[in-house]
Amino acid sequence: MSREWFSWLAWTLGWAWTIAAGGGGLWLLFTRGPWPPTNGWFALLSGLAACPLLGWSLKRYAGVSLPASVQFFLAVAFFTAGHFALLIWPHV
């Protein structure tokens, strides 16, 4: 596979995750409120971590290069933390 194809795929999946997880988390916050912390916060943070715009902005404005693999790891970590948080604060 070519590097350009992989880059395009990562960019597309990053935006898809941003829209699905970030948008879903934001929707939960609007419909169910901000409490308990499991009501969309982890999904919203997971979506923001996966957003390709985050890596681009950090590189351009802060001079920090954030590899796509690190963004993916952070997105999965927030997603997983949200599932573990459900063990502490189950949905009512």
Image (cartoon, rainbow, N blue to C red):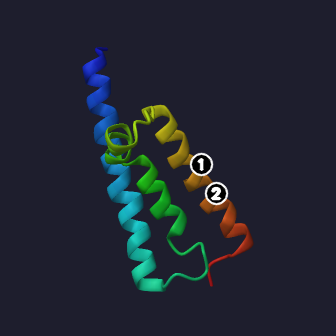
Q: CA distance from mark 1 to mark 2?
A: 6 Å
Q: Residue at x 67, y 76 (%)?
A: 90
Q: Looking at the rendering, which quadrant does residue 57 occupy?
A: top left
- Residue lying at the far front in this picture: please name it: 62
Assign a secondary structure to mark 2: helix
Q: Looking at the rendering, which quadrant does residue 8 occupy?
A: top left
Q: Is residue 18 left or right of residue 49?
A: left
Q: Which residue is mark 2?
A: 81
Q: Which residue is mark 1?
A: 77
Q: Looking at the rendering, which quadrant does residue 84 occupy?
A: bottom right
Residue 59 image offset from top left, x and y in percent: 36, 37
**Residue neighbourhood size for the residue with mark 2, other residues' Cα within 10 Å, grouped as few (<14), some (14–19), many (≥20):** some
Position above or below: 27 against 65: below
Residue type of the residue flagged with mark 2: Ala
Q: Residue at x 30, y 17 (%)?
A: 3
Q: Residue at x 63, y 61 (%)?
A: 83
**Residue neighbourhood size for the residue with mark 1, other residues' Cα within 10 Å, grouped as few (<14), some (14–19), many (≥20):** some
Q: Are marks 1 and 2 in contact (CB under 8 Å)?
A: yes
